Amino acid sequence: MRELSGQSELASTPKAHPFRWSRKGALRKAVPFMGPAFLVSVGYIDPGNWATNIEGGATFGYTLLWVLLLSNLMAILLQILAAKLGVATGKSLAENCREHFRKPVAFFLWITAELAAMATDLAEFLGAALGIYILFGIPMFPAALIGGAITFGILLLHRYGYRVVEIVIFSFVAIVALVYVFEIFLAKPDWLQIGYSVFVPRLDSSSLFVAIGMLGATVMPHNIYLHSAIVQHRLRPGDPEHNHRVYKYSIVDSTAALNIAWFINSSMIIMAASVFFANGYGVESIEEAYATLTPLLGGFASLAFAIALLSSGLSSSVTGTMAGQYILEGFLKVRIALWIRRLVTMVPALIIIGMGIDALKALIISQVVLSMQLPFTIIPLILFTKNKKLMGRYANKPITNVLVVTVAVIIISLNVLLLYQAFGGEF
């Protein structure tokens, strides 16, 4: 890596009085700074999560709930670091990679990031198409085209400011959360088993593939790139005190948004375990999960499930397209219209739909691809955020470095285990 030189003006120490958490009206003051993490959190409850969570709950019961807790803690740490990088440098992770790595390295990282963005787009686009298909009975291919058209419409809202897009996305997140509160109420889960499974890790060769898919679906590379970019819309060049507040509130923003996403993901596993696993129903597709809910919980439950799936697919399609745009622009200094980006990334999903490939399996494989790419996103993030010349006062503290390196080791180790199993190994 080239020498990181020139501490950013944004990373300089503010001269005004320090930020205090205990100020009166802290919540009111926080509101203008909230939003970027909620935009990012949509990627943590996208249809890829639905696929891995339903598969995990239906096949292994509550066993893999601990994976979601671990993934969520790692995601919060990584998203805070991504936001901090954006605040300290005034540049996204992709831009920092382009500026501070040699061209061959930066090009390799761009290719891996684009592959991750394509895998993400595949999951989100398939989910939106599935939601339209389930709700309205429209065949998958035209449903996919309709989903693309709706996404185009939402993307056009960014012309009115990112706050408008954030409000629309938050509304979608609220719909998904309310649906799963309702689903859990109907499912009547075993809360003692849930508590045990959240805090006691259990993993074997049969559940490893799904566990890593859950990790890939929760800690997502494109979200790290996206967060480091969109937080800059809250910055004021030349106003270090304001920018310091942006960073402080990004911690609150990330913690709140990702814990909501954790609740939704956990609710998916709990619902699948309580309804499908407990009753001996094997679920091999999201459509089957929808169909099975009707006799088990009633027609309204399955309808709510489909509405939540559609909301998840549409909203995550929007944020996935935005992330892909920031990746392309950051690495290559190439900017294209968001609708063109959306049009191009629709192609792989349309091919899969046209070939009749099982959507659930395609979704799970896409999440494993994301997990395999994660080290190539996390390692540059660690290198940048621990560098005092680049980050100034925002450089990671020693304990933060220990935690984030531990996260990287866990992720890389799980990927090694996956490759070991792929070549016939067992444990």
Image (cartoon, rainbow, N blue to C red):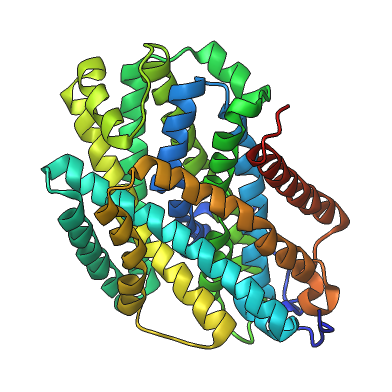
Would you place residue 20 above or below residue 67 in this image?
A: below
Q: Can you give x and y, in whole percent of width and height, for residue 180 in the image?
A: 35, 32
Q: Can you give x and y, in whole percent of width and height, for residue 334 in the image?
A: 48, 87
The reply to whether residue 324 is in sight is yes
Q: Is residue 142 left or right of residue 75?
A: left
Q: Report the residue that reaches farthest toward the right.
A: 398
Would you place residue 365 above or below residue 343 in this image?
A: above
Q: Is residue 49 left or right of residue 112?
A: left
**Residue under the point 48% across and 42% down:** 260
Q: How many marks?
A: 0
Quadrant in which the N terminus appears: bottom right
**Residue under the point 38% across and 12% down:** 280
The reply to whether residue 90 is in sight is no
Report which quarter residue 197 is drawn in. Answer: top right
Q: Can you give x and y, in whole percent of width and height, for residue 80 in the image?
A: 64, 58
Quadrant in which the C terminus appears: top right
Q: Is residue 355 left or right of residue 75?
A: left
Q: Report the residue that reaches farthest toward the front.
A: 424
Report which quarter residue 160 is drawn in. Answer: bottom left
Would you place residue 199 above or below residue 157 in this image?
A: above
**Residue under the point 48% across and 51% down:** 366
**Residue under the point 76% across and 80% down:** 12
Q: Is residue 112 left or right of residue 182?
A: right
- Between 51 and 351, which is closer to the camera in this rendering? 351
